[in-house]
Image: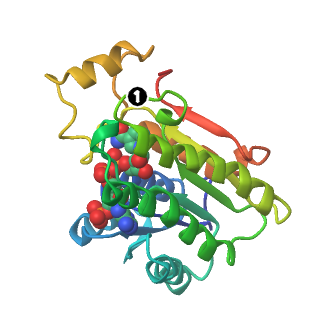
C-alpha cells in the first residue's frame, strides 16, 4: 500500500508549476487529488490526464481562492468527487517585485488577496471537513527568512503565511490536524520562466547562494510535500521547512 492510499487531497493552483508537481506526486503516493486552477483549465486537465495515465485518480476544479465563493467551491468539489478531505496544499500564489517607490495599492492587494486571504479562505472551508490526521501544507517562500530588494510586498505575503501556519497549528492541533509551511527557494516553473534561464543574472546569483548548486524543480518541492502530508510527519506541526538546496 502506498503512503497516501485512501487519502483525499486538494492542491490549489495545480494547473502548472509547483502545484502541478505536488498534485502528481500526491497521486503517485496513492491520494485522490483535486487539481485546482483559476484561469488555466487546459493546464489542470493535462495534469489530471497525466495522473490518470499513471494509474492515479484526480479531478480538475476551477475556483479563485481569493473569493469566498471560489474557495468554498474548491472544497465542495473535493467532497462531491471523493467524499472526504485529508490533505490541503495551499499553493496558489502570485508574485511581482518592485522597489519601494513603485509599490501600488493595486499590486499590494493583488498579492495579498491570493497569497494570504486566499489561503485563509480555502483553509476555513477545508477545516470543516479535515479530521484527525489531516495535514495542511502552506507553500511559503525562503524570502520570508532572506528578504531581497524589491520583495517588500511579496515577502510580506510569505511572512504572513508563516505566521498563519503557526497560528493555525495551535487552533487546529486540538483536532489533531497538522499545519506546516513548506518554503521553496528559486524553482523553475511557468511563473518564473520570465525571470530565470541560462543567461539570467538572477538565476546565477541564486545558484551561487545555494549550497547544492542549482535551481529547484517542482519535483524537489513535491517530495517534501508528500512527506509532510503523510503519517511519517505525524509529530510535525507549526514548522517552517525550507526546500531550497540550502539557500
Ligand atoms: N517558483 C518559485 O521560484 C517559488 C519560490 C518560492 C515560493 N513559490 C511559491 O510557490 C507557489 C507556486 O509558484 P509557481 O512558481 O509554481 O507559480 P506559477 O507557475 O505561476 O503557478 C501559479 C499557480 O497558482 C494559480 N493561481 C494564481 N492565482 C490564483 C487564484 N486567485 N486562485 C486559484 N489559483 C490561482 C495559477 O492558476 P492558473 O494558472 O489556472 O490561473 C497557477 O496554477 C506560489 O505560492 C509561490 O509564491 C514559488
Residue 53: x and y in percent read: 32, 63
**Which residue is more in the foreground, 169 or 6?**
169
Image height of 239 relative to 26, above or below: above
Q: Residue 212: percent from the left, percent from the top? A: 43, 16
In this rendering, position of residue 243 left or right of residue 170: left
Residue appearing at x 42%, y 62% in the figure: 114
User: In the visual, does 59 lie left or right of 225?
Assistant: left
Residue at the spot 16% in from the left edge and 23% down from the top edge: 198
Q: Residue at x 52, y 39 (%)?
A: 183
Residue displayed at 39% across by 61% down: 109
Quarter containing the N terminus: bottom right
Q: Is residue 153 above or below residue 58?
A: above
* The quadrant where residue 124 appears: bottom right
**Residue at image mark 1:** 148
Q: Residue 92 is drawn in which quadrant?
A: bottom left
The reply to whether residue 1 is in sight is no
How many residues crowd around disc 1 within 10 Å: few (fewer than 14), some, or many (20 or more)?
Answer: few
Q: Is residue 32 left or right of residue 106?
A: right
17 and 80: which is toward the camera: 17
**Where is 3 relative to 75, above or below?**
above
Amino acid at each position: 500500500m502506498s503512503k497516501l492510499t485512501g487519502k483525499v487531497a486538494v492542491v490549489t493552483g495545480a494547473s502548472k508549476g509547483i502545484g502541478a508537481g505536488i498534485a502528481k506526486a500526491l497521486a503517485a503516493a496513492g491520494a485522490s487529488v483535486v487539481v485546482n486552477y483559476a484561469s488555466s483549465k487546459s493546464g489542470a486537465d493535462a495534469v489530471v490526464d497525466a495522473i490518470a495515465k499513471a494509474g492515479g485518480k484526480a479531478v480538475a476544479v476551477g475556483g479563485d481562492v481569493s473569493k469566498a465563493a471560489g474557495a468554498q467551491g474548491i472544497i465542495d468539489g473535493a467532497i462531491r468527487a471523493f467524499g472526504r478531505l485529508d490533505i490541503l496544499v495551499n499553493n496558489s500564489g502570485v508574485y511581482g517585485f518592485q522597489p519601494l517607490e513603485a509599490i501600488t495599492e493595486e499590486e499590494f492587494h493583488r498579492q495579498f488577496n491570493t497569497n494570504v486571504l486566499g489561503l485563509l479562505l480555502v483553509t476555513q472551508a477545508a477545516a470543516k471537513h479535515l479530521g484527525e490526521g489531516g495535514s495542511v501544507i502552506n507553500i511559503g517562500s525562503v524570502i520570508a527568512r532572506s528578504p531581497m530588494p524589491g520583495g517588500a510586498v511579496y515577502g510580506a505575503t510569505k511572512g504572513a503565511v508563516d505566521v498563519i501556519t503557526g497560528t493555525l497549528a495551535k487552533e487546529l492541533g486540538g483536532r489533531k490536524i497538522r499545519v506546516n509551511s513548506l518554503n521553496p527557494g528559486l524553482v523553475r516553473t511557468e511563473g518564473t520562466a520570465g525571470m530565470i534561464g541560462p543567461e539570467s543574472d538572477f538565476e546565477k546569483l541564486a545558484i551561487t547562494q545555494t549550497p547544492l548548486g542549482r535551481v529547484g524543480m517542482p519535483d524537489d518541492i513535491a517530495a517534501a510535500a508528500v512527506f509532510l502530508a503523510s503519517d511519517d510527519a505525524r509529530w510535525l506541526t507549526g514548522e517552517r521547512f525550507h526546500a531550497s538546496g540550502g539557500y
